[in-house]
Image (tube, rainbow, N blue to C red):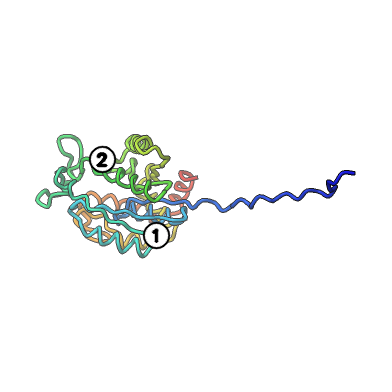
């Protein structure tokens, strides 16, 4: 007779696989102005972990760095890194990097505003991409906009796509450059802040003014004029602009 047992063989069960989704991480390029603050507000609602990064390049409105620190803490960013990139100030001559060059509402001979800082977003997005690599972030979020932009070539969608491709190829890692405001005008950007019940904070506690005045700003520089025009348009017809925003972001 066989000595083998007819009893069913017991198999060792495999340990259960984790079904916990990976934590989504994002980095927001954060200046403490209207656009980047709105991006941070939205990112905090969309990602599990949001880090802010601010660049000190010796900018004319240097108060924005302190404003950014306060807002990042108040809104609940996971961390806030401030990087010293003052070497940009040595290379890029602009009304935003030189106190003795007044901010002008007129264009220069090359068709750009005198507040354009050559290479600024190239440098910022490169450093933000490196930071994303180090902490394993999925996305770098920036508040650039082609609809109501100030004529800066480094705010255009073509530039963003080219930078994203360069970062992915250069670091051999998937990374998205996310631009929530790219196709929104300023009125719709105000609507986005209001969607998250943060319009008062963006209106009163951000610093967009080229002359470094918090909230409403000086009222005369190009940044203040564009910001106020958008706010007036939004407050005049909030429901219709919210509907446009919903259609654009659906």
Residue ID at (38%, 42%): 177
Residue ID at (20%, 43%): 117
Q: Nearer the viewer, mark 1 or mark 2?
A: 1
Residue ID at (27%, 43%): 121
221 or 133: nearer the viewer: 133
What secondary structure is marked by label 1?
loop
Q: Answer with the quarter of the image where residue 178 lies.
A: top left
Mark 1 Cα within 10 Å, few/some/many (few <14, many 20+)?
some
136 or 144: nearer the viewer: 136
Is residue 210 visible in the rendered structure shown here? yes
In the displayed structure, does residue 76 sit left or right of residue 88?
Answer: right
Residue ID at (47%, 55%): 48
Is residue 224 visible in the rendered structure shown here? no
Q: Position of residue 24 (x, y in %)?
A: 47, 51
Residue position for label 2: 152
Marks 1 and 2 sit apart, C-alpha to C-alpha, by 30 Å
State yes or no: discs 1 and 2 in contact (Cβ < 8 Å).
Answer: no
Q: Position of residue 218 (x, y in %)?
A: 21, 58
Q: Answer with the quarter of the image where residue 228 lies.
A: bottom left
229 or 144: nearer the viewer: 144
* Number of marks: 2
What secondary structure is marked by label 2?
loop
Check the picture and name the quadrant holding the N terminus. Answer: top right
Task: Report the disc number at residue 27.
Answer: none
Mark 2 Cα within 10 Å, few/some/many (few <14, many 20+)?
some
Specify which label sits upstream in the sequence, 1 or 2: 1
Residue position for label 1: 78
- Residue at the limit of the structure toward the right, as seen here: 1
- Residue at the limit of the structure toward the left, as seen here: 100
Q: Position of residue 86 (x, y in %)?
A: 18, 50
144 or 227: nearer the viewer: 144
Q: Position of residue 104 (x, y in %)?
A: 16, 46
């Amino acid at each position: 007779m066989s000595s083998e047992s007819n009893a069913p063989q017991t198999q060792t069960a495999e340990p259960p696989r984790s079904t916990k989704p990976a934590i989504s991480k994002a980095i927001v390029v954060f200046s403490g102005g209207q656009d980047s603050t709105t991006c941070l507000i939205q990112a905090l609602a969309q990602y599990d972990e949001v880090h802010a990064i601010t660049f000190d390049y010796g900018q004319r409105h240097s108060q924005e760095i302190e404003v950014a620190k306060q807002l990042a803490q108040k809104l609940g960013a996971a961390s806030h890194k401030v990087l010293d990139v003052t070497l940009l100030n040595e290379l890029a001559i602009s009304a935003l990097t030189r106190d003795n060059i007044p901010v002008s509402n007129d264009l220069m001979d090359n068709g750009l505003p005198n507040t354009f800082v050559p290479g600024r977003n190239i440098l910022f997005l490169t450093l933000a991409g490196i930071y994303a690599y180090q902490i394993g972030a999925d996305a770098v979020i920036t508040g650039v906009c082609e609809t109501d932009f100030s004529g800066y070539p480094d705010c255009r969608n073509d530039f963003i796509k080219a930078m994203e491709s360069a970062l992915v190829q250069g670091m051999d890692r998937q990374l998205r450059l996310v631009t929530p405001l790219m196709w929104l005008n300023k009125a719709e950007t105000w609507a986005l802040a209001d969607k998250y019940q943060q319009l008062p904070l963006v209106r009163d506690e951000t610093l967009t003014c080229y002359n470094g005045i918090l909230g409403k700003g000086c009222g005369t520089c190009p940044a203040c004029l564009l910001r106020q025009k958008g706010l007036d348009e939004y407050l005049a017809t909030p429901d219709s602009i919210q509907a446009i925003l919903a259609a654009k972001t659906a």
